[in-house]
Image (cartoon, grey):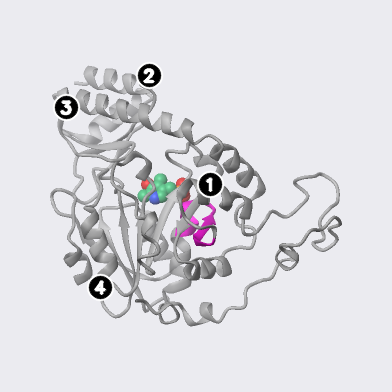
């Protein structure tokens, strides 16, 4: 069991949130809106959007199998990554623990919020034990970050080890499942009732093909979601985004279709990379990208840029020396990359 009041920053726990015009009337039928100093012309963009995005959450609740009140929506996952720091971590005092290497935003947000960031190095298979992560915590550790499938390595972290971390830690464990639609490992989203200290992140930016609309999700207990809602900007998800997300969610089968095609392309690309004399290793992946160790990543990266093809050079990342991270594109795009690499010398 966790003590949320003890985990939360005192000023946030005691915060009286801004009460917007739209908040105060919420839930009742109305015809005439003269409460928010809006312009009556230029519908529908003249009106402030729903601060709690309830229509969108009702649909997401069905698609994701999580109760509406356990869903937080933000301006990309970026907002859902920043908010836990602002809500739970006291600047200059508290710390967070994370696997290393991983997604860069956890550290950037820690630095912005003046929170000590404690990276724990993965092993040579890009895995980690619960024991090692828990050993890096102390009385001031508020959050453990686990990205699975992990970026940039691509692999899932062993599920049993994640479960052990959640069960064995009295602070919050945030499992970033941005790539879970591409993975065969079961999501932690469905385990929220079992773990009151668990937060799971999802995004519309990857499998759902909506990176431009900026919509990220956090799934957690109602108590945690209520704290996020209190601290977020009142209208953090704009109307255009809410509408476009609803549109995309109408067709989950389209997403399934994309994922299937991308997984076939992924296998094809991995086989092609393994045949390249300049490729030394392709690492196992559960995401829509893979990490490949090359003989000279930076030289190959620059060669590809000169040919109008951009991949991600991860050479300077710990445990990723000489690695390129390759996103799976369309069959044509993937073909262009392979053709260029075959001509490289
Ligand atoms: C791409 C990615 C995200 C998505 O971020 P958005 O702000 O939602 O676009 C989140 N986490 C990881 C690990 C990612 O790689």
Measuring from the top left, give residue 299's x and y in whole percent: 23, 32
Q: Tell me the crowding category of disc 1: few under 14, some 14 to 19, or many 20 or more residues within 10 angstroms, Cα based.
A: many
Q: Residue 96 placed where, x, y %?
A: 33, 69
Q: Which residue is mark 2?
A: 332
> In what quadrant of the picture does the C terminus appear?
top left
Residue tagged by mark 4?
Answer: 137
Mark 1 in CB contact with mark 2 (< 8 angstroms): no
Where, quadrant-wise, is the N terminus in this rendering?
Answer: bottom left
Give the left or right position of residue 74, taking residue 32 as reference. left
The residue nearer to you, when weighing 121 against 218, is 218
At label 2, counting other C-alpha atoms closer than 10 Å, the crowd grade (few under 14, some 14-19, many 20 or more) is few
Residue holding disc 3:
274
Q: Earlier in the sequence, mark 1 or mark 2?
A: 1
Horizontal placement of 239 versus 101: left or right? right
Residue 149: image location, x then y, percent: 30, 47
Ligand 1 contact, mark 1 (Cβ < 8 Å): yes
**Span highlighted in magenta in the image:** 69-80
CA separation, marks 1 and 4?
Answer: 32 Å
Beta carbon at label 4 within 8 Å of ligand 1: no
- Residue drawn at x 64%, y 43% is 243
Q: Is residue 71 above or below residue 203?
A: below
* Residue shown at 28% from the left, 40% from the top: 286
Percent across and percent down for residue 288 are: 34, 36
| First along the sequence among labels 2 and 4 | 4
Q: Looking at this view, is 309 or 260 the one in front? A: 260
Please, what secondary structure does the residue beneath circle 3 have? helix
Number of other residues with Cα within 10 Å of mark 3, as a class: few under 14, some 14 to 19, many 20 or more: some
Residue located beneath label 1 in the image: 214
């Amino acid at each position: 069991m966790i003590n949320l009041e003890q985990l939360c920053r005192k000023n946030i726990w005691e915060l009286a949130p801004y009460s917007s015009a739209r908040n105060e009337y919420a839930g009742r039928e109305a015809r005439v809106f003269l409460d928010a100093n809006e312009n009556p012309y230029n519908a529908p963009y003249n009106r402030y959007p729903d601060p709690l995005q309830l229509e969108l959450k009702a649909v997401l609740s069905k698609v994701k199998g999580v109760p509406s009140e356990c869903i937080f929506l933000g301006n990309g996952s970026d907002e859902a990554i920043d908010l836990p720091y602002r809500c739970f971590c006291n600047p200059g005092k508290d710390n967070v623990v994370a696997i290393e290497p991983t997604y860069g935003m956890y550290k950037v947000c820690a630095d912005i919020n003046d929170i000590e960031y404690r990276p724990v190095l993965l092993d040579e298979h890009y895995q980690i034990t619960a024991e090692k992560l828990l050993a890096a915590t102390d009385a001031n550790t508020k959050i453990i970050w686990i990205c699975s499938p992990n970026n940039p390595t691509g692999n899932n972290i062993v599920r049993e080890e994640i479960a052990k971390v959640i069960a064995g830690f009295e602070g919050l464990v945030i499992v970033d499942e941005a790539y879970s639609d591409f993975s065969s490992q079961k999501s932690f989203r469905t385990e929220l009732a079992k773990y009151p200290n668990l937060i799971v992140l999802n995004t519309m930016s990857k499998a759902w093909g909506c990176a431009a609309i900026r919509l990220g999700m956090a799934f957690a207990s109602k108590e945690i979601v209520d704290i996020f809602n209190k601290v977020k900007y009142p209208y953090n998800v704009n109307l255009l985004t809410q509408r476009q997300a609803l549109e995309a969610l109408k067709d989950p089968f389209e997403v399934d279709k994309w994922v299937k095609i991308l997984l076939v392309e992924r296998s094809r690309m991995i086989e092609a990379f393994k045949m390249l004399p300049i490729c030394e290793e392709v690492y196992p992946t559960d995401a829509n990208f893979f990490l490949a160790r090359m003989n000279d990543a930076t030289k190959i990266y620059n060669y590809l840029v000169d040919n109008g093809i951009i991949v991600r050079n991860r050479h300077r990342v710990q445990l990723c020396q000489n690695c390129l991270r390759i996103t799976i594109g369309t069959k044509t795009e993937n073909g262009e990359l392979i053709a260029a690499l075959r001509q490289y010398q």
